[in-house]
């Protein structure tokens, strides 16, 4: 698998980095910059936008991300995806707002048509 194989839109299902493991849904769009680094954009529960940049090696995708949280403060984190194939990513993440005793979890499934997006 190459980094180019990952370009596209994915539906995501995840759980937050906390004791309750609150779940969320959304979309992840992956594209490439001129240096073939990953550009990631998430839309979580139709309200929260997150973005990041990353790299790909040996079927592992690592993305450093950030988003604007409460009081317009910028929060940062890192997500690591195991790329099972070009259509399914299995990941875990941690960010500074989350409980450090837990990891968030996220699974991504390639959108092949507009009906694939999970709502």
Image: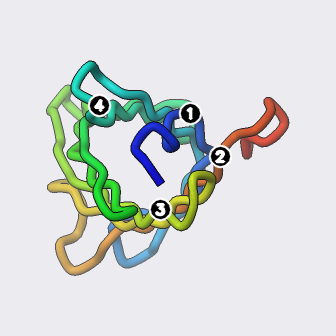
Q: Is residue 43 visible?
A: no
Q: Are marks 1 and 2 in contact (CB under 8 Å)?
A: yes
How far apart marks 2 and 3 lie (CA) works out to 11 Å
Q: Which residue is mark 1?
A: 8
How far apart marks 3 and 4 lie (CA) works out to 17 Å
Q: Residues within 10 Å of mark 3 (few under 14, many from 20)?
A: many
Q: Which residue is mark 2?
A: 110
Residue 106 position, x and y percent, is 48, 61
Q: Is residue 88 above or below residue 10?
A: below
How far apart marks 1 and 2 lie (CA) works out to 7 Å
Q: Which residue is mark 3?
A: 83
Relative placement, left or right, of 115 versus 63 is right
Q: Identify the mark nearer the N-term, 2 or 3.
A: 3
Residue plotted at (22% across, 54% down): 78
Q: Identify the mark nearer the N-term, 3 or 4.
A: 4
Q: Is residue 48 above or below residue 108?
A: above
């Amino acid at each position: 698998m190459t980094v180019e194989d990952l370009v596209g839109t994915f539906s995501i299902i995840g759980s937050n980095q906390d004791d309750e493991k609150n779940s969320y849904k959304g979309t992840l769009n992956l594209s490439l910059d001129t240096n073939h680094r990953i550009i990631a954009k998430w839309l979580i529960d139709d309200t929260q936008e997150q973005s990041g940049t990353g790299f790909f090696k040996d079927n592992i995708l690592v993305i450093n991300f950030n988003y604007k949280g409460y009081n317009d403060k910028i929060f940062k984190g890192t997500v690591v995806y195991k790329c099972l194939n070009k259509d399914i990513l299995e990941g875990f993440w941690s960010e500074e707002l989350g409980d450090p005793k837990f990891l968030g979890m996220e699974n991504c499934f390639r959108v092949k048509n507009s009906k694939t997006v999970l709502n």
